[in-house]
Each structure stands twice: as C-alpha cells, then as structure tokens.
Image (spheres, grey):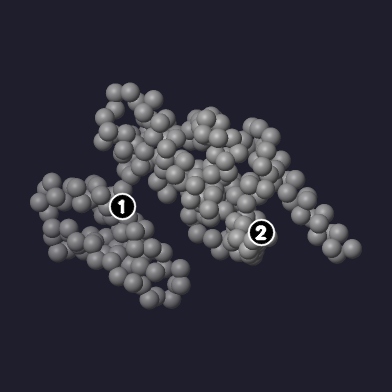
Amino acid sequence: MKFISKIWSKKSADHLLFLKLKNLLGYSLKNKNLYRAAFTHRSMNIRNEHGVPLNFERLEYLGDSVLSTIVSRYLFEKLPEANEGKLTRMKSKIVSREKLNFIGKEMLLLNLLICSGSKEKFGNDIHGNILEALIGAIFIDKGYEGCKKTLIRVFFKPYIDLDSITNTVASYKSLLIEWSQKNKRNLVFETNSDNGKDPNINYCCKILLDNKVRAKSRDITKKKAEEKAAKRAVHLLKK
C-alpha cells in the first residue's frame, strides 16, 4: 500500500506541476519529462538508467545561452536606432542575475521546485536559476521561434520596460570605477575572505576613495560583496 501511495503521490505532484506550467506558459506541454527536470533540484539525487543526474542544471546552462540570443534579437528589432554599445548595455541589464531573480520570484517558480528539505535554505539566485532552466526546456520543446514567442508573452511584456531599463544601473562597481577614472580619484576595492560566524557569508569588501573608507559589505561571493559595497558608495556620493 505504501508503494502504491508513493506512485499516486508522484502522479498527483506531476499533474499539479504540469497544470500550473500550462496556465503559466499558455500551451500544453509536449515533453513533460523535460519540464519535470527543469524543476528538479540536484538534492533529489535522481539519475536516469545511464546514471546521468536528472536535475535543472544542464537546462539552466542552455536557457542562459538561449535567453541571451533571444534578448539580443528582441533589442535589435525594438531599438533600430541604438548603436552596439547601447544594445550591449541594455542586454546586460535584462539578463542580469538581479533581474532574472526578480522575474523568477514574481513568477513564483520556487513554489514548483522539487527538492529535498526546506526551500528556505536556497539563496536568492535559485529564482533566476529555475527561470533559466525553464527557458531551456521551452527551447527544446518548442524550438527557437516557439521559445521566442513564449518569452515575449510571459517574460518581456509583463516584466521588461525598455524605457525604465535604460535608466537603471547594470553594475555599480563599473559605474564607480568609471566615475573615479573620469574625476581622477584614487579608488581601491579591498576584498578578502570572511571568516565570521555566518557560514553563508564568504567575502567582505571595503571600498576606499582617496584612502578613506567609503563603504563596506559582506556577501556569499566576491562579486556580490563588491557590487553591494559599490552600490552603497554610489548612494553616499550622490548624497
């Protein structure tokens, strides 16, 4: 009875996942195993008959590349007067980790994740990772044109405003470096490993401007610690 109960439970979970994805994407799924993999975390430790892990990581890799290509074409068509530099900056803002995390969170994709243990243990990047995996699955299932049409409907139209994106900052670190060079200021990023009590904090960053500490921050990666500190420094300089 327990075995039958497990089978029934899995079928019910699958049915709910596929139903929610159909409502989200607006079409019936062809390769359902593909979409199940897109929402399976490696903590489940599931493998196929050849011993290959079945989780969203490979689809995430594919989705990242597909999204970059589709965004590039979308901007090329929407902004016929924009030069290469503007197109590059716009694309970097749209496919930034912060933007993808925000969109994945708004789409409630984490609610559909199949994982072992509590979902609260994952960092903020999980939202963007699942989104990229879903895009990879859509690409394989629907092809390039089908994937593009789906993304325009569920990704671009609800969440991408080209006018507002033009005025957003893609990288506060790059902005700060560019400002310091233009104004001939001495800017130094001091980033080191963090051995504090919090195991989720791996790096600390201190920003010095003309030998004076302007901002500090701590985060899980070196890049995130520096970006967070740079954002604080930029806001302080504006004040």
As helix, strand or loop, the secondary structure at mark 2 comes to: loop
- Residue 145: image location, x then y, percent: 52, 30
- Can the viewer see residue 105 in this picture? no
- Residue 52: image location, x then y, percent: 60, 60
Q: Which mark, residue 148?
A: none
- Can the viewer see residue 55 in this picture? yes
Judge left or right: residue 169 versus residue 63. left
Among the 4 quarters of the image, the one containing residue 50: bottom right
Q: Residue at x 36, y 58 (%)?
A: 224
Q: Residue at x 40, y 46 (%)?
A: 96
Q: Residue at x 76, y 54 (%)?
A: 10
Judge left or right: residue 13 versus residue 154. right
Query: Counting other residues with Cα less than 10 Å from the Cα at mark 1, is it few (<14), some (14-19), or many (20 or more)?
Result: some
Of residues 62 and 208, the one drawn nearer to the viewer in this rendering: 62
- Residue 31: image location, x then y, percent: 66, 42
> In the image, what residue type sits under mark 2?
Asn
Q: Quadrant of the N terminus?
A: bottom right
Q: Is residue 60 above or below residue 145?
A: below
Q: Which mark, residue 231?
A: 1
> In the image, what residue type sits under mark 1?
Lys
Q: Which mark, residue 48?
A: 2
The residue sitting at the top extreme is: 80
As helix, strand or loop, the secondary structure at mark 1 comes to: helix
The residue sitting at the front extreme is: 50
- Residue 163: image location, x then y, percent: 37, 30
Among the 4 quarters of the image, the one containing residue 204: bottom left
Q: Which residue is drawn at 34% across and 36% down?
A: 90
Query: Counting other residues with Cα less than 10 Å from the Cα at mark 2, is it few (<14), some (14-19), or many (20 or more)?
Result: few
